[in-house]
Amino acid sequence: MFALDGWRYGDYVYAVEKKIARMLRKIRDVPGLSEHEQHLFARSLAATPDERWRLHENYLRSHGLYTRSDRKKYGFK
């Protein structure tokens, strides 16, 4: 997939995966984390602030808690 300005999605994905792998090596010996939790933690550490915000919004959307009214239905303030 190519964009008009020459930015390529595949290059971006490769760079992000490299950052995640680097973070995984750093947190490999953290006690009490499963392999899945290590990957999620490494992904959040490797993400930029905008990417972390997007991950958070996608999480809320996937659980039906994106809008304030949706959160109030489930007892959140």
Image (cartoon, grey):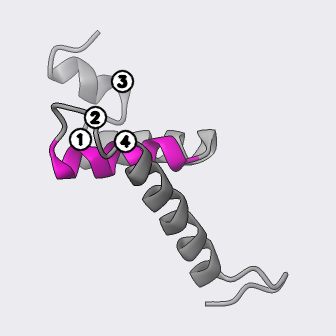
Q: Toward the viewer: 70 or 16?
A: 16
Which residue corresponds to the image point at 75% horizontal and 79% vertical from the top-left? 7
Residue 63 vertical placement versus 68 (above, below): below
Residue range in magenta is 34-47
Magenta: main secondary structure: helix
Q: Give the mark, 3 or 4, whose residue is nearer the N terminus.
A: 4
Number of the label disc, if any, that sits on residue 30: 2
Q: Three-letter amino acid code at disc 2? A: Val
User: Where residue 15 sits in the image (x, y, percent)?
Assistant: 60, 69
Q: Residues within 10 Å of mark 4 (few under 14, many from 20)?
A: some
Which residue corresponds to the image point at 74% horizontal and 84% vertical from the top-left? 3
Alpha carbons under labels 1 and 4: distance apart: 31 Å
Alpha carbons under labels 3 and 2: distance apart: 36 Å
Instruction: Say which residue label 1 marks.
Output: 64
Alpha carbons under labels 4 and 2: distance apart: 5 Å
Looking at the rendered image, the disc whose residue lies closer to the viewer, 3 or 2, is 2
